[in-house]
Image: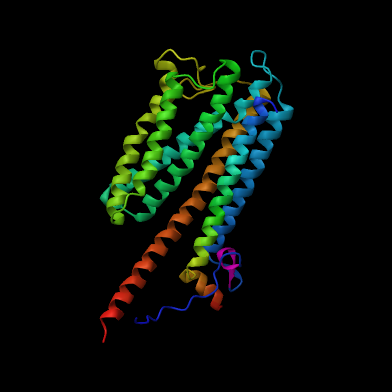
Amino acid sequence: MSYVDAGYCVVLGSLFAYAVSLVARERAARRRLPPAPDEAEQSAS
Amino acid sequence: MSTVSLPPRTKPAVGREPAGGRLGGRRSPSGRADVAVRALGVLALTGIVATCWLGLFVTPEAVNFGNLVRLLYIHPPMAWVAFLAYGFALATSLLYLWPRTRDPRLDRLAGASAEVGVVFTGLTLVTGSIWGRTTWGVWWTWDPLLTTTALLFVLYVGYLALRRVPGDRETVAKRAAIAAVIAFVDVPIVYFSVSWWRSLHQAPTVDLAGRHLYVHGLMAWTLLLGFASFSLAWAWLMVHRYRLATLRDREADEGLEVAIAERRAEGLP
């Protein structure tokens, strides 16, 4: 693997890992909470 | 031990349609926002894939740097997005500090943007270090640009640590906003360090002051696509980080409400 490939791997890998962690943490936080008022309204309709 | 009646917890909305769903055949405001965020994510991802494809396989090698020039399509965009993130954190922090526009959402936006900025600053340092190893022969040197960028990283890690120091929400937000303003002082120093001091690092590829781009043709377009794509990625990441901060604040508020209800129930005969 060249230095160039290593650079691209580090950038893309880190951004992907950070994005996945954000989405996973957001979903976990939503699961722990009751739905927000507009979401509850939608569930009821 | 007393019992407390809490509101029933319904099944969470995530993963189901509500967040991006329809209300009576029309999308709700939160649903429309969710669609926009998804579109932003798709656009950012497409742009990044295109940048990598053009940068790795289509653009030519440079006369002086050979194959190494391909790092150019990711390293300056990382630095640019870090500046963008810190600039946004500065703007929202200043708005927060001004009493007429004080709003907890601005504080959350500043925190979210700064955290994403720290990720991009870290990536700037790593890609810059790879560039340094191959062009200067060292992974790190105490060059003005590298040193001030490392300082920038440490300053904003400190800012994020400060946000975690316990206190009432307004006090925490106010001191974080002041810290964001102080930390931003290093951003112009980083950008102009190559002009102000003798530096190993070459002049910026995109000279904002002189309005000049030091690459041309397909190389320039690939670089500009990199700037645009990673900026969109910053926006997408920031929206998700902001949502997470909002949910955590809600969680903390509800936890407080439950604790108050429990204490009240304990006091009843």
- A30 and B240: which one is in front? A30
Residue B224: x and y in percent read: 59, 31
**Quadrant of the drawing holding the C terminus of chain B:** bottom left
Stretch of the chain drawn in magenta: B17-23
Q: Give left or right: position of B205 versus B86.
A: right
* B170 in relation to A7, above or below: below
Q: Which color scheme does this rendered protein use?
A: rainbow
Q: Give left or right: position of B86 versus B230.
A: left
Residue sitting at x 34%, y 54%: B103
* B42 in relation to B212, above or below: below
Q: Give left or right: position of B187 versus B16.
A: left
* B107 in relation to B206, above or below: below
Residue sitting at x 46%, y 37%: B84
Q: Residue furthest right?
A: B57
Q: Is residue B236 magenta?
A: no
Q: How many marks?
A: 0
Q: Is residue B18 magenta?
A: yes
Q: Residue furthest front?
A: B1
Residue B35: x and y in percent read: 59, 57
Q: Residue furthest bottom?
A: B269
| Quarter assignment of residue B53 | top right
Residue B36: x and y in percent read: 57, 54
| Quarter assignment of residue B93 | top left
Residue sitting at x 35%, y 35%: B183
* B213 in relation to B266, above or below: above
**Quadrant of the drawing holding the N terminus of chain B:** bottom left
Residue sitting at x 54%, y 39%: B231
